[in-house]
Amino acid sequence: LKLVHQRHSENTLHCTMTKRLASEELCGPAPRRQALERFMLPGSRNRKRTPVRRSFVQARCGLEVYEVLPEQEHEYTFIYMHALGGFHGGPKTITTPPRFFAMSQRWPKNMRLVVPMAPWRAMTFADGREMYAWFDYLSTSGGRHQDPIDESHLLHMRKSLHELIAQEAGLVGGHSRVFLGGMSQGCCMGLDAFVHYPEPLGGFCGLAGFVMDSTNEAAIRRSAQKETKIALFNGCNDRICRQGWVRPANQRLAAGGFDQVSNHFEKYVCHAIGGWEQWWILEFVREMCQVISDGEDTGSSQAASDFGSQTVSNNV
């Protein structure tokens, strides 16, 4: 009840800003969107206002990147890939709770949130309807199995995300301080980029997604992320990414030599996970930042290995 009350309060506080953003017509195709100047979002009563800015980064293959700046010195970066269709209501809704987890008081004050937007493209499975998507689905099975995708889109987005990761690693002083995450299609895209990245990263947090067949066994076996923490969260009642085939798909990581993978299936949760998105991500980033901090203080990797042996939550 306390959590529900807090979300209601945050929604009330953000009401004015949300209405103003809604009038700025940010939901259209990327080339026609208006530039969003820097503004200040009202936070909770006991929290300082957090600056949010949007930037178009030419060096990253045209990806538009939304950033939430840390309140303290920038030490970590969390790169989050949105689901198919972007954020409900358009890019403006990354600034509204509960999805906007960086506005939570539990968000690490030294971590920057980086949200790249997928291209605006026509989708074959939707008879040419345009939406924000990391890659095209050539057909849909209605959740019975993985859907075939356009491999060229996947390769292009993988390259773009790798450039983004490399730049963020340069800003924070190391790849181990960069974390990836994603929701649904963003989880699938993020996992593919994560597995193929040539340097060990800080960790990955995936929601309502899975390891795609396009992320082949050879890539998994030679991945540099085998000792990196991966936390995957799915709903038992998900009718799009169904437990029956998602669990075996994700188990391919352990079979390929990944030894720090946890895959939790939450009871009664469907594909639209709602507030679980905020909860799972906050739990992940806070624990991982603490692991890195403890490891640096002791000069040992024992803390990281201890965390890797734990399960983020009990599997069902």
Image (cartoon, helix red, strand yellow):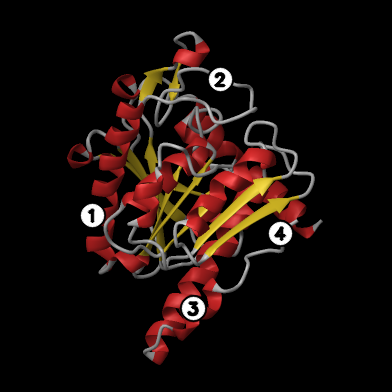
Kindly report the distance in space between the C-alpha atoms of the residues bearing marks 1 and 3: 27 Å
Q: Are marks 3 and 4 in contact (CB under 8 Å)?
A: no
* Residue type at numbered disc 1: Gln
* Residue carrying label 1: 167
* Residue carrying label 3: 305
Q: Earlier in the sequence, mark 1 or mark 3?
A: 1
Kindly report the distance in space between the C-alpha atoms of the residues bearing marks 3 and 4: 20 Å
Quadrant into which the C terminus falls: bottom right
Q: Residue furthest top?
A: 127
* Image location of residue 239, percent across then percent down: 70, 32
* Image location of residue 223, percent across then percent down: 34, 57
* Residue carrying label 2: 140
SS for callout 1: helix
* Residue type at numbered disc 3: Ser
* Residue carrying label 4: 315
Q: Earlier in the sequence, mark 4 or mark 2?
A: 2
Kindly report the distance in space between the C-alpha atoms of the residues bearing marks 4 and 1: 35 Å
Other residues around mark 2 within 10 Å, as few (<14) / some (14–19) / many (≥20): some
* Image location of residue 244, percent across then percent down: 68, 40
SS for callout 2: loop
Q: Earlier in the sequence, mark 2 or mark 3?
A: 2
Q: Earlier in the sequence, mark 4 or mark 1?
A: 1
The residue located at (65%, 47%) in the rendering is 234
Other residues around mark 1 within 10 Å, as few (<14) / some (14–19) / many (≥20): some
Other residues around mark 4 within 10 Å, as few (<14) / some (14–19) / many (≥20): few
Q: Is residue 68 above or below residue 307?
A: above
Q: Is residue 72 above or below residue 168?
A: below
Q: Are marks 4 and 1 in contact (CB under 8 Å)?
A: no
* Residue type at numbered disc 4: Asn
The residue located at (71%, 59%) in the rendering is 315
* Residue type at numbered disc 2: Thr
